[in-house]
Amino acid sequence: MNETLSIVIYVLVAIAVVGFSATLLVRTRRTPKSMYPTRRDANDPVTGTGGGTDTLEAPPAETDVVVPDDLRGLEETPAPPAPSIETPEPVQGRLARLRARLAKSNNALGKALLALLSRDTIDEDVWDEIEETLLLADLGTEPTMELVDALRQRVKVSGSQDPQEVHAMLREELIKLVDPTMDRSLAVTRHAETPAIVMVVGVNGVGKTTTVGKLARVLVAEDKDVLLGAADTFRAAAAEQLATWGQRVGVPTVRSEIDGADPASVAFEAVKAGIEGEVDVVLIDTAGRLQNKVGLMDELGKVKRVIEKQAAVDEVLLVLDATTGQNGLTQAKVFAEVVNISGIVLTKLDGTAKGGIVVAIQRTLGVPVKLVGLGEGADDLAPFEAESFVDALLS
């Protein structure tokens, strides 16, 4: 009896020992709770959310990576789209458009001349009115007398009073004055080792920076590789404005990050970059300056001399506002003495009775009008053509 009771107790103890051992084994194989906390720490820089609770599941297999919601803001964001590059209008297309615009403008010069010359009788009073009309159009005294004398002689010899014949005579004499024989081409052909260098100068407010931007579009339309130099360092917005013009057609701009920096230094760096980049043309925008400010004009001469330490300056274009009339001639003379002007860019030529300024400027400086602007559009700049200009005046 006692032996049987001992056996039962022994068996029960053995079962208890085995069960306790199994329980310990199972617990040692469980994953510690600290590995996957069920509550986020608000101070944790990665998982913290500033409060609140959340349950995180065990991480999936390494082959299936999932970014937690809290880290989605750190995912790589796509790069912003590159700015679209505009395609400038072909030069020939804009020439036709500009001619049409000038012909439709309120062109007092052409209208007045044709009205006078189409009268039944062309007497001395009519010739006096023609002379006055030409002078008011800023043709200049000497060219006006030449034109009137030539017309009077031709009308007298022909004896014709037919308006169409007189119109043809006027056209021929005006074309002579505008002079189609002048070389109006731009020197923008790259040299063997250096790019062509073009400086753009003028007084304040005539639109030099805009003209440089539009000229860049003209050259890009002709498949030229262009670089811009923002040497107008006195007007705060000038460099940014020029860079914007360049970005629109994919043209880089060399500029200074410091307002009031030495413009000659900026021009030097622009030419240096143009040489290293083997571009075709470097366009240098300069600060506007009054022609009677000796110090500023001397500085403009310095800019040109500094550029020439690396490469020859092929073009110096003077930007003039057609509406300034005879005052533009005074400006032109002073600039020509300082930097040797090679061509004129005449802006705001549409809708004005001052078309005669083309002749006056060319006579005064002995240099041609090479480009004309007839509007505010990006492609409203085109090469000047003598016959097309006269035809537009007399349309």
Image (cartoon, rainbow, N blue to C red):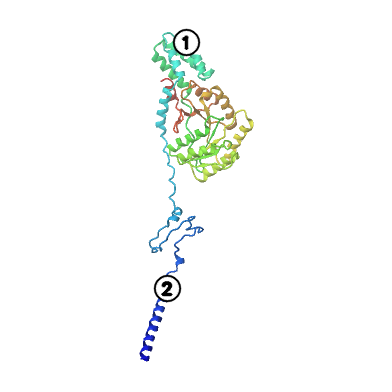
Quarter-of-image position of residue 55 = bottom left
Residue 18 vertical placement versus 81 (above, below): below
Classify 10 Å Cα crowding around label 2: few (below 14), some (14-19), many (20 and above). Answer: few
Q: Is residue 94 visible?
A: yes
Disc number lying in front (2 or 1): 2
Residue at disc 2, secondary structure: helix
Quarter-of-image position of residue 113 = top left
Q: Which residue is mark 2?
A: 27
Residue at disc 1, secondary structure: helix
**Residue 384, position as x, y percentages in the image:** 46, 28
| Quadrant of the image containing the C terminus | top left
Residue type at mark 2 is Arg
Residue 126's tag is 1
Q: Nearer the viewer, residue 41 or 382?
A: 41
Residue 377 vertical placement versus 72 (above, below): above
At x 46%, y 61%, the residue is 39
Q: Nearer the viewer, residue 61 or 136?
A: 61
**Residue 102, position as x, y percentages in the image:** 43, 24
Of the image marks 2 and 1, the number of the one nearer the N terminus: 2
Classify 10 Å Cα crowding around label 1: few (below 14), some (14-19), many (20 and above). Answer: some
